[in-house]
Amino acid sequence: MSVSMPGSQTNPESGVVGSGGATAPLLAADGRPLKVSLRRAMFKNKARALLLVSPLLIFLFVAFVMPIFSMLTRSVESNEVITLLPNTAMAVQAWDGEGLPDELTFAALAGDLKQGQIDRNLGRVASRLNYEYSGMRSTITGTARRITNLENPESWKETLIDINSNWADTGVWRVIKRESSGYTLSYYLAAMDMRYDEEGKIVRQPETRRVYVDLMIKTLWMSILITFMCFILGYPVAFLLASLPLSTSNLLMMMVLLPFWTSLLVRTTSWIAILQSQGVLNNILVAIGVVDDNNRLQLIYNQIGTIVAMTHILLPFMILPLYSVMKSISPSYMRAARSMGATGYTAFRRVYFPQTLPGIGAGAILVFILAIGYYITPALVGGESGRFITNFIAYHMQVSLNWGLAAAIASILLGAVIMLYLLYNRIVGSDNLKLG
Amino acid sequence: METPTNTDRKGKKKSFVVFDSVQKTYDGESLVVKNFNLDMDQGEFITLLGPSGSGKTTCLMMMAGFEVPTHGQILLDGVPITRLPPHKRGIGMVFQNYALFPHMTVAENLAFPLQVRNMNKSDVTAKVKRALSMVRLDNFGDRRPAQLSGGQQQRVAVARALVFEPELVLMDEPLGALDKNLREEMQFEIKHIHDQLGVSMIYVTHDQSEALTMSDRIAVFDDGIVQQLASPEALYEAPENAFVASFIGENNAFVGDVLELSEQEASVKLPTGQVVRALPVNVSGKGQKSTLSLRPERVVINPEPGTQPNILDAVVHEVIYMGDHLRTRFSVAGNDNFIVKTPNSFGVSRHKAGDKITVGWNVSDCRALDA
C-alpha cells in the first residue's frame, strides 16, 4: 500500500530516542514503544485495504467457503437415526453388539416407529438405512404400519420379530447402532468401492459393483493426457505469439482467444458435428479412401471425443501463461547461447526451455485442475467410456438424490487436487509458478 | 596498413577483421548501414561510437552472425564468415543487459560455452575457476545472477565471453546499465583485461567518454555512415567534419561563408559581420558555407590586443563553478552558447553575468569544417 495517509504519519522524530541500550525497546517521541506506534500508523492503511476487498471476501465466504464446508459436512453427516428414532438410538448404545438388544430397546424402537408413523417422516430414515442394509425400507415402513394400533403387547421383541424377521438379524441392529452416532463413514466407503459387511467390518465391494475407484483413476489419467496434449499443442503457438512481430501476433492472439468468445455448448456440439460417424471428418476420410464407408471411425461418445473436445476447450489456459512467460524472456539469452557456441537446438534445450518451466507449470496445473472437474463436455461427448467422475457426482445429486455420496466423491476429488497441488508445490515450488 | 606479410613484429595478424563495403537494410527501403569498411588488426580495441539508430549495433550483430549483410563481405582472419551461423564463429560477446542465464549459477553460466564444446569436466572446472578469479569473483560461483550487483553481473558477463578463449570479443553497450562511478571503474577493468589477454575487441557505445578512454581506434557512426575512423586523440584534436566535432567533446560552433581560402588559412565571414581566421580542414572553395569548430579550453579570455589572430567581443551570461574548472557561457558573434573552460587555478578572475570582455583564439585551434 503506497497510499499516502495524511494524519497517520509517525512522528518524524520517532526512533531517535533509543537511549543506547540495545535491549531496551525503541521508543517513539511520545514515549510509546516504536512497534506500537508503527502498528497504529499502519492500522488505518490495513483497515482501508480490508474494507476495499471486503465485498469480495464476503462473496467468497458465502459462495465458496460455506458450500465447501457444507459439502464436507454432508459427506459424513448421518443424523436420520438420531433425530427420527431418538429413543432407539439412545437405547441401542447399551447393547454390546452381540446377539440381540434387550426388550427395552425393542420397546423404544416401537415407540419411535409409532411416533414416526404419526409424524409421517419415517421415509428418510427408511431410505437412509436402506443404503446400508437393503430391505430396510420395507422393514421399517411395514413394521410401523402394523404396530400403529398395537398397545403394550407382552413383549415388543417377539412382536416385532413376528412382524418382520429382519428384526432378529444382528446385522440390522449393528447398522442402527453404527448410524446412531450422527456421523458415518459409509458415504466415503461407498465412494471408494467399499462397504461394511454383516459383521460391521470394512470390506471391498463385490467386483461387479466397483465403479468409482476405476472411474477416478480414469478421470485422473485422462486429465493428465489432456494436459499433456495442451502442452504439446500450445507450446509452439505460445512461442510464435511471443516471437512474431506485434501485428501478426495480435491476429494470432485473437485466434487463440476466439474460443473464449464462443459458448461452451456451441464449441462442444460443433465437435459432435465434426467427429460423429456421419460427420465432417469421417466423410473426408471416406472420400479420400482412408476409411471404408461401412467401417467409419467411432470418434465421439467415447474417450477420444472427450479428450479431443476438452483439449480444444482448455488449450487457451495453457497458451496464455506460457505466452506471458515467453514474452518476458529476452531474445538476447538465445543469442548469448548461440554466440558461445551452442547450436540452435542446444540453446533452446538448455537456455530457453528451462526458463519457460514456470509457464509450463502454471499452464499445466490450470488445465489439469479445470480438466479433472469438467462436467459438461464429458457429459455431452463422452458417451459411456469417456465419462468423468464429475458426471457421477451430478448423477447422485440430480437422479439418485444420494447427496451424501455425491458430497463424499466431490470431497475426495477436492482432496486429490489439493494433494496433487501440494506435491507439485513440493517438487516445483509455487514461486516458480507464473500465471501471467 | 598495407604490408606484404599478414603479421607484424609481435606476431599479431594484420587485417584480422575486415568489413568490405557492407550494407544492411531491414525493409528494402532505407539502408541502416550504408557502406561500412573496417580493417582491424589482431589485438586492437575498436569502438563503434554513434547516436542510437546510427547503425553501430547492426554492424556488431552482423559480426556476431545474428544479422546477414544485404551486401558486402565480412572476413575473420582472412575467412569469409558472412554466411557462417553464429555458433561456428567462435566470437565472444557481452550483451547490453548481460544476458546471464537466470536459471543457472554463475559457475554454470561460465561453464556453458565450455560444455557445448564438449570439454571434459576437470578442464571446465579449472577454466571456470580461472575466469572467476580474473574478474575477482572467486567466491561467487554458486550464486545466481539475480543475487549479484550490477557491477558483479557485468564482470560475470565479461568472464563468460572470455572463458572459451575467443580471439575476438564483441561488446554491445555493456556498461549502459551501470551508474557513473561503477562505469568508470569497469572501463579500466575491461581495458586491463584487453591489455592482459591481447584479445581483439569491438565495442559499441554511445558514450563518447567511454570510447575515448578505452579505444585504440574509434569509428564514429552517423546515419549509417562512418564519419571518421581514427585514434581518440585525432578525433578530438582533429575532427574531420562538423558532426564529429560536435559529437566528440564540447564544441563551440559558428556557421559562416568562406571569404578567402589558402593552404594554411581560411577567412570566414560570420552572419554578424566579423571575419574569423581558421584552419581549413573540410572546405572546398570560396563562397561556400562552413562550420567553424573551436574547443572551449582553447579560448583565451581578455587577450592583449594583437596577441591572438582572432579577438571578438563577448558578453558573459553565466559562470558555473565546476570545482576543478570554471565554465563560462558567453554571447559571441550571435552565438549565445559560447562556452569557455578555464582551470580553477590561483589568481583566475571570475566574471559576473553582464560583464563585457573580449575572447581570442589561435588560427590552428579553430577548424573550418563542412557546413
Image (cartoon, rainbow, N blue to C red):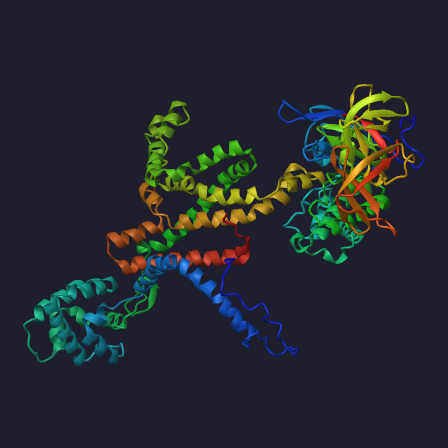
Residue pictured at 10% horizontal, 69% vertical: A118
The picture places residue B165, in percent across and down from the top left corner, at 80, 43
- Is residue A205 visible to the viewer in this orientation of the structure? no
Q: Quadrant of residue A325?
A: top right
Say above or below: B350 vs A85: above
Q: Is residue A108 left or right of residue A218?
A: left
Q: Judge left or right: residue A122 versus residue B67.
A: left
- Identity of the residue furthest to the top in this view: B286
Residue at (49%, 69%) from the top-left corner? A40
Closer to us: B330 or B112: B330
Q: Position of residue B3 (x, y in %)?
A: 91, 27
Q: How many marks?
A: 0
Q: Choose top left, top right, bottom left or bottom right for residue B217.
A: top right
Q: Position of residue B185 (x, y in %)?
A: 78, 50
Indicate the position of residue B218 as horizontal and vertical percent values. Answer: 80, 35
Which corner quadrant holds the C terminus of chain B?
Answer: top right
Query: In the orientation shown, which residue stands out farthest toward the right?
Result: B9
